[in-house]
Amino acid sequence: MGGEGVGIRFCGVTVRFGAYTAVARVDLEVGPGEFVSLVGPTGCGKSTLLNMAAGLLPPSEGEVYLGGRPLRELNREAGYLFQQDAIFPWKTAMDNVAFPLLLRGVPLSEARARAQAWLEKVGLRGFSHRYPHQLSGGQRKRVGLAQVLIANPHLLLMDEPFSALDVQTRQLMENELLELWQADRKTVLFVTHDPEEAIALSDRVVVLSAGPAARPIGDFPIPLPRPRDVAEVRLTPEFLRIHREIWNLLRGEVMRAHAGA
Ligand SMILES: Nc1ncnc2c1ncn2[C@@H]1O[C@H](COP(=O)(O)OP(=O)(O)OP(=O)(O)O)[C@@H](O)[C@H]1O
């Protein structure tokens, strides 16, 4: 697969839901091929920003640019992975992964061959004929990842994709994601409430303030060497230093969010 990442930029973006201002005057840029995580207290607007990047939600004010062009419709260069599984229960793993290709008119036999290759890349060789209910949570997540990546998106939007998994499975999936990402450097915007996950994965971690009118209040470069093992990197002094800095900023916002809830 080819396809480097495409950059995305939020420029003075404000989103209102009726009288409620969710995010206000957000300026945020994710460069081509960069892996950026958004962390912030619950309800601060992380999913709102992802939905804008997906072109599902227009800003009330400001503009979102995709590769330098204003994004005014559904973002067809983006692949979206949610916390909940979005795979079809009535299709096998193979047909779930082949589905985006069939939508594009790729013939069935070719789509299935490419789906099989992707199932192997995400560690599901031998599981292609299973239905989602015959797979574990981690395996279903792998099917979802293959289904998104087979469409070769230039931008990956991930909304707490691994938060429902147990710790070991989650770390395996995080390492696999990093490996796949290193292979062709798609742009990634990753939402998580967990600063440790954000630091272990990212090139930069952006901290959002509590809502209403949330906005970025910290932007931390993560100079940890790659390739990374997400479990091992957490034990390094550099990781702990960055974690302390981010948590010092985040803690106050988490408390503000709870006080306002
Ligand atoms: N369609 C909507 N109508 C009204 N309010 C909304 C809508 N979507 C989101 N909101 C509000 O906007 C704010 C931001 O929501 P969003 O889902 O982006 O937060 P989040 O940071 O992703 O939260 P969490 O970490 O809990 O998933 C919240 O207060 C939410 O209640």
Image (tube, grey):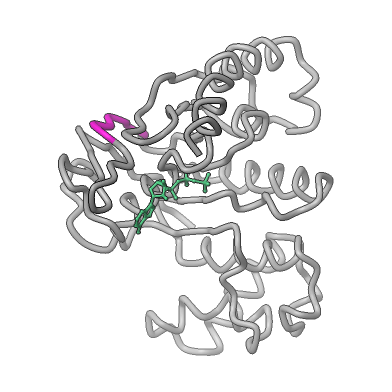
Most foreground residue, 221 or 247: 247
Q: Percent x, y for residue 61?
A: 15, 42
Residue beneath the point at 76% across and 64% down: 137
Residue beneath the point at 47% across and 43% down: 43
Residue beneath the point at 51% across and 50% down: 158
Q: Percent x, y for residue 98?
A: 55, 79
Quadrant hosting residue 215: top left
Quick check: is 28 in the magenta stretch? yes
| Circle count | 0
Q: Which residues are magenta?
A: 24-30
Quadrant hosting residue 200: top right
Q: Is residue 76 above or below residue 13?
A: below
Q: Is residue 170 left or right of residue 248?
A: right
Most foreground residue, 158 or 61: 61
Residue beneath the point at 68% across and 78% down: 93
The rendered magenta stretch, by its main secondary structure, is classed as strand
Q: Is residue 106 left or right of residue 172?
A: left
Q: Is residue 227 above or below residue 124?
A: above
Q: Percent x, y for residue 28?
A: 32, 31
Q: Is residue 16 left or right of residue 250?
A: left
Q: Percent x, y for residue 54?
A: 34, 56
Q: Is residue 162 above or below residue 84?
A: above
Q: Residue furthest right?
A: 168
Q: Is residue 8 left or right of residue 178?
A: left
Quick check: is 220 in the magenta stretch? no
